[in-house]
Image (cartoon, rainbow, N blue to C red):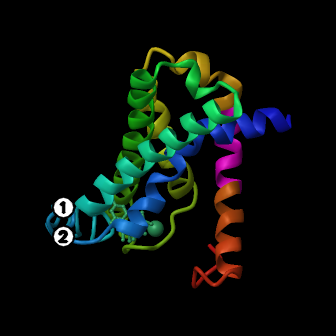
Amino acid sequence: MIELLTLTIWLLLPSYTPNNFAVIFGGGTPIDMGKKFRDGRRILGDGKTFRGFLFGVLGGVFTGIIQYGVENIFGFSIFSTLPLPSFLILSSLLSFGALTGDIFGSFVKRRVGFERGRSFPVLDQLGFLVFAFLFASIHPAFGTLYTPDVILTGIIITPILHVVTNIIAYKLGLKEVPW
Ligand code: CTP
Ligand code: MG
C-alpha cells in the first residue's frame, strides 16, 4: 500500500513539477498573443506564457534527471531500468503532456467564461495528469512502469495531494487562499 503510494508519486513527479517551474519562471508574451476567440474571450489568457511553458517543460525533465541520479546513488531502479536517452524521452513526454493539459484546461475555462486564476475543480487537478499519461503512453516502456494500479492510484491521490499542498502553502504564507 505505502509502497504503491510512494512508487506512484515517484513515477508522477516529472508531471507534477512543470507547473511549479512555470509559476516561478513564467511571464512575458502569452501563448495566445493576447488574441480573442470567436466568443470574444481570450483564447487562453495571460496565465499561459511561452516562458512558463518552456521552463516548465525543462523543469519537469530536470526533476526526472535528479530522480535518475538519486536512484543511482541510493541503488534502486525505477526510472533507471531504462537507458538514460530513453528515460529523457519519457520524462519529456510526461512534462510536455502536463503543460499541454494545463493549456487545454485554460482553453476550456475561458470558453465557459471563467476568468484567469479562477479554480475549476477536477479539471485543474486531473487535466494535466490525463494529458501526461496520454503523451507518455506512446513511449515503449510506458506499460511496464505505469501499470493500471499506478494509473488508478495517481488519479485518486493527485487531487488529495493538490488540496494538502495548497493548505500547507497557505499555512506557510506562500499562498493568499488555502485552495
Ligand atoms: N504560467 C505561465 N505559463 C504557463 C503556465 C503557467 O507563465 N504555460 C504561470 C503564470 O504566471 C500563471 C501561473 O504560472 O499565472 C499559475 O499557473 P496556472 O494556475 O496554470 O494559471 P492561472 O493564472 O491560474 O490561469 P488559468 O485560469 O488560465 O489557469
Ligand atoms: Mg490557476
Above-or-below relation of 42 to 103: below
Q: Name the residue nearer the viewer: 54 or 134.
A: 54
Q: Position of residue 28 (x, y in %)?
A: 22, 71
Which residue position holds label 2? 40
- In the rendered view of the protein, which quadrant contains the N terminus? top right
Spot occupied by residue 100 in the image (x, y as percentages of width and height): 35, 46
- Whole-percent x, y for residue 24 in the image: 41, 69
Residue 39 shown in magenta: no
Of badges 1 and 2, nearer the viewer stands 1
Amino acid under disc 1: Asp
- Residue 157: image location, x then y, percent: 71, 47
Image check: 80 left or right of 45? right
Query: Which of the two labelled residues, at mark 1 and mark 2, occupies the earlier sequence position?
Result: 1
Q: Quadrant of residue 125?
A: bottom right
Compared across the picture, whether 136 is left or right of 173 comes to left
Labels in figure, total: 2
Instruction: For residue 76, say whether it is visible.
Output: yes
Along the viewing direction, whichever of 129 and 80 lies nearer the viewer: 80
Q: Magenta residues, as a range? A: 152-160
Residue behind label 2 places its C-beta within 8 angstroms of ligand 1: no
> Callout 1: helix, strand or loop?
loop
Left or right relative to 175: residue 134 = left
- In the rendered image, the quadrant that contains the C terminus is bottom right
**In the image, what residue type sits under mark 2?**
Gly
Above-or-below relation of 29 to 107: below
The residue carrying mark 1 has its beta carbon less than 8 Å from ligand 1: no
Residue at mark 1 to residue at mark 2: CA–CA distance: 13 Å
Q: What residue is disc 1 on?
A: 32
Say which residue appears at 37% left-offset and 73% top-offset.
116
In-front residue for pair 44/168: 168
Q: Label 2: few (<14), some or many (≥20) within 10 Å?
A: few
**Which residue does the image show at 36% across and 48% down from the upper left?**
57
